Amino acid sequence: MEPDARQPHVPALPVIEGTVSELDPQFKDEVAAHLGGLDLAYCFQCGVCSGSCPTVAWMEYGPRRIMHMVRLGMADKVLRSHDIWFCVSCYSCTARCPQGIEIADVMASLRSLAIAKGLAKDREATFSRVFVEVLERYGRMYEPELLLRYYAAEAGLAGLLRQAGLGLTMLRKGKIALRPERIENTGELGEISVRISEGSRPEPFDYAQDRPVEGEER
Amino acid sequence: MKYAYYPGCSLHASAREYDISWRALCERLGIELVEMEDWSCCGTVHATSVDRLLALALAARNLSIAEAMGLEMAAPCSGCYKNLRTADEALKGDAGLRAKVNASLPRPFEGNTVVRHPLYIILEDIGLDTLADVPRPLHGLRVAPYYGCVLTRPAALHPVDDPEDPQGLDRLLQTLGAEVVPYPAKTKCCGGAVLVSHTDVVLDLTGRLLKQAKEAGAQCLAVACPMCQMALDAYQSQIERRLGERLDLPVLYFTQLMGLALGIDEGQLGLGRLIVSPAKVLARV
């Protein structure tokens, strides 16, 4: 259900439901590894992040609780939550965190974990996925295709029609490209993407030599 | 002064007036821009949401083009600037990450360039002293500088301005003769990251900040990011409907205001492409 913008939802304290088996003790390590070994244990729940967040009124938990839920291992609740998709990546939380935790980056990691595990259900998740597909197709953004595909998948004709006036104004002002721009080798980004997903497996790396270990195949 | 120019997708489409005015400005100031060949989309926040490593690789691909040119990079979209700058810092600082990303790239990232935003190229490389006697000062114009979020955040390894109380745009506008209007929301987010998916959020955030700027006495806003500009300008009629009041606040790129002050022909600044017309406000200058 969509949070009502005009009536900020005051959430109840998160309750750990059911049994301990619902919790995933590895979750915080998974999130930390995703960010190159960030230590979430530094968080002492001061709440500056939620106090600084411009979209906390639309969230069920807000960043402070999300941070704690990650540490408790509440993977399922966190990754299914809309909150992570209401984060606008403004980095106010990161700028103010007295413990220097990159909270906005944690939110981004949670978003990609939610997509990877098939738990993302927010409209913004669809938008992000379509965005990357269009990017990989042309190498540059082509808004008409992005918007048509997003509205087709998510908001339907009504959503598209609501913004039709804006679309026409932008068209009149020459702000919408009629044809896509392409990079020379449009296959290149797809290849990068494939190699990135293959390379997600750990690779032996020699830190002393500052290069991958020679002669070892992945 | 010569830079590898990374326009980003917006400056080739919805924000062409930013591209036009920035190029005109560079010509006037003796800055040479060489548009990077075959640059690709930075992926903005959306690619990072899908896959952080992919987003880093997309940035690294572009950084390596600038490296091959042997130039520092100029990226006028704050979103691109943030993505490229933070990727550059992350890859320079983490050899393991660099190796992982480089394994996916046709041309490796070496770490030989620096990502710059035009506002700070002007402030640091041109300098305000050079701009002290502009031919057409913006006297009588009350401008609210709007930095948005990712121009100054997350804080750079070597920050060029304060992440939450930056002064660069204020100082530039003052030097150009404008009256700078202080208001608390100058680094508050416009919500651009969820502009399409959660438009209501954006209309609330932008409504709040435009109202605040107006109440502080601003006649227009100066911005340095095409996403902010679109949220504040193209959506302004929707914001007005939601607020139930008229705002009529033109949202200009700082390059357009600077071009005017330098006496660059208005036709070269793309003013007609703005949706809320600045004509009435600029007539007073």
Image (cartoon, coloured by chain):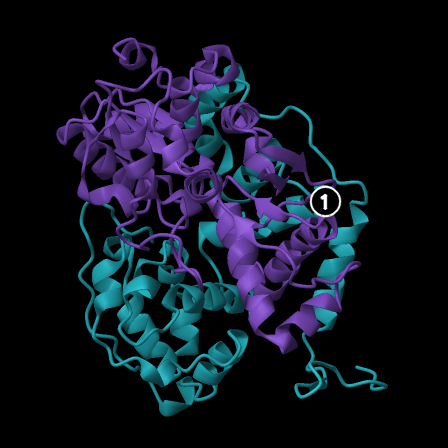
Chain colours: A cyan, B purple
- Provide the chain ID for the residue under circle 1: A
Return the residue at label 1.
Answer: A137
Apparent side of residue B111 relative to residue A111 in the rendered image (left or right): right
Residue at horizontal 25%, vertical 10%? B284
Q: Locate residue A3, reporting x and y percent.
A: 28, 52
Q: Residue at x 29, y 10 (%)?
A: B280
Vertical placement of residue B80 versus A46, above or below: above
Q: Nearer the viewer, residue B7 or B239?
A: B7
The local secondary structure at tag 1 comes to helix
Front residue of this view, candidates B50 and A14: B50
Residue B30 drawn at (x, y percent): 56, 29
- Asked whether residue B46 appears in the rendered view, the answer is no
From the top left corner, tell me how far across and down residue B246 is, in percent: 21, 20
Name the side, left or right, on which A172 lies relative to A137. Answer: left
Placement of B113 over or under B202, stated as above or below: below
Q: Which quadrant: the C terminus of chain B? A: top left
| The quarter of the displayed image where residue B5 is located | top right
